[in-house]
Amino acid sequence: MDAGTRRLVVGPFNRVEGDLEVRLDIAGGEVLAAFVTSPLFRGFERILEGRDPRDALVIAPRICGICSVSQSHAAALALAGVQGVAPTPNGRVATNLLVATENVADHLTHFHVFFMPDFARAIYAGHPWFARAEARFKAAQGTSVRAALATRTTLLHVLGLLAGRWPHTLAIQPGGVTRGADARDKMRLLATLGATRQELEERLFGVPLARIAALAAPEELDALRRGDSDLALFLAIAEDLELAGLGRAYDRYLSYGAYPDEDGRLYARGIVTPEGRGALDTDAIAEDHTNARMEGRWRAHHPFEGFTFPDATDETGYSWCKAPRLAGLPFETGAVARQMVDGQPLIRALVASRGGSVFVRVLARLIETARTLLAMEDWVRRLEPGAPWCAQGEMPREGRAAGLTEAARGALGHWLRVEDGRIAGYQIIAPTTWNFSPRDAAGVPGPLEAALVGAPVRQGETTPVAVQHIVRSFDPCMVCTVH
């Protein structure tokens, strides 16, 4: 390090799913460079090797306790690809409902439990909004925190009705779902979603969901700031603290597309870069091991050819996380990526104006919450009691396929190879693997590492508050990151 540069190691972080450590080089009151470490190796990809391919439906969801439905969906999609089976219409719609329920629940948890409590800390006591933030968002005590957890409980009844339990449901299969819904179940599902909608409109948004889903221009946020909702308070805090200027990465976004329908997907598949929107070529995805404590540093590996051999003696790697790249470049994923790729006009306008930021990432989750819940009500109405819920397929002795879906935190992929009737290879790239990746062979930082550069660090701070805001804006799930 140069003279005048000091090093600060931040971690472990509270209110983050799993273990995380960030090494910061600081000079002149700001971050010059960041090195993000995933300190826990778990080995799920190795556990799956040599097993019956269908075991993935049981083992893969156990990767995580908060996004297990997404892991289950990715595994089922990979198996469906190997079997050459497509889900029935009911099965597809029910699967969308299951994945969407978990994703919306995760968005609510992130906003109320992980992100907003930071603004109820004493460091912000001098700001005009602090008393309201403390009353609403103080960790485990705030009125909005408690109300959001109750709303989340209401919403998760959808999983109880359609999947039997959460987490680690076994309901999602390659050809659909294991349990159907009758007319009475449809009424209960609509009642559950209606209650969830009412609670969100009253407290979180203060306006109908349709108005949030239709937001198109930055000036439309001005009217929402004048309300008494949780969103209004967030907008006031974001404006005061200039969160729209904090935490910009590369403005490159990737989405596998979410919630397939007869006519495509609710959220489109593709990429967005500063040069424009483009198609997603999954053959261009590769994982770089240069700064991961893994064997195989000689080249980047496409997931079908990838492997996970930990090297505990490695002295150069600083993370167990590999570095996923698309055509050699780091990409950000998550709700902001889905909304950018799908063309949501407000999110696109905000990114075009000042780039991706803490503010945009959080706002994209809130807009997506409204859009997704509205779609869920429509999906329930499409369910046809008495029609087939699951198509059957045969597992071949040879084959390979990728299961690509969207978890709350972004693009999730499972790459499966079957040889002689057994799993010969199973590689997983989770959203946080993309976002929290280390540097690659060219020395290019991952998205979070890039987003942290320039973050202000106050004198005497050991856990810089701006760094915490940036980290939490990505909503990391570290237990999903290294397999």
Image (spheres, helix red, strand yellow):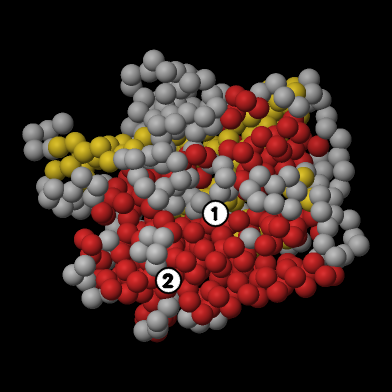
Residue 13 location in percent, x, y?
A: 35, 45
Q: Is residue 281 above or below residue 122?
A: above
Tag 1 residue: 408
Q: Residue at x 51, y 51 (%)?
A: 409
Residue highlighted by disc 2:
143
Disc 1 is placed on an element classified as loop
Amino acid type, residue under disc 2 in the picture: Thr
Residue 342: tell me if it is visible. Answer: no
The dot on residue 76 is none
Image quadrant for the N terminus? top left
Report whether 436 appears left or right of 247.
right
Question: Is residue 24 at all visible to an observer of this figure?
Answer: yes
Chain-order first, disc 2 or disc 1 = 2
Q: Residues within 10 Å of mark 1 (few under 14, many from 20)?
A: many
Between 451 and 67, the one lying in front of the other is 67
Q: Residues within 10 Å of mark 2 (few under 14, many from 20)?
A: some
Relative to 291, is 467 above or below?
Answer: below
Judged left or right of residue 262, residue 215 is left
Give me the residue at 44% from left, 31% from top: 40
Residue at the right extreme? Answer: 386
Residue drawn 13% across and 38% down? 5
Quadrant assignment, res 143 = bottom left
| Figure quadrant of residue 218 | bottom left
Q: Residue at x 40, y 64 (%)?
A: 141
Give the percent coordinates (x, y) of residue 354.
33, 63
Depth check, mark 2 against mark 1: the one in front is 2
Q: Residue 3, relative to residue 375: is it above or below? A: above
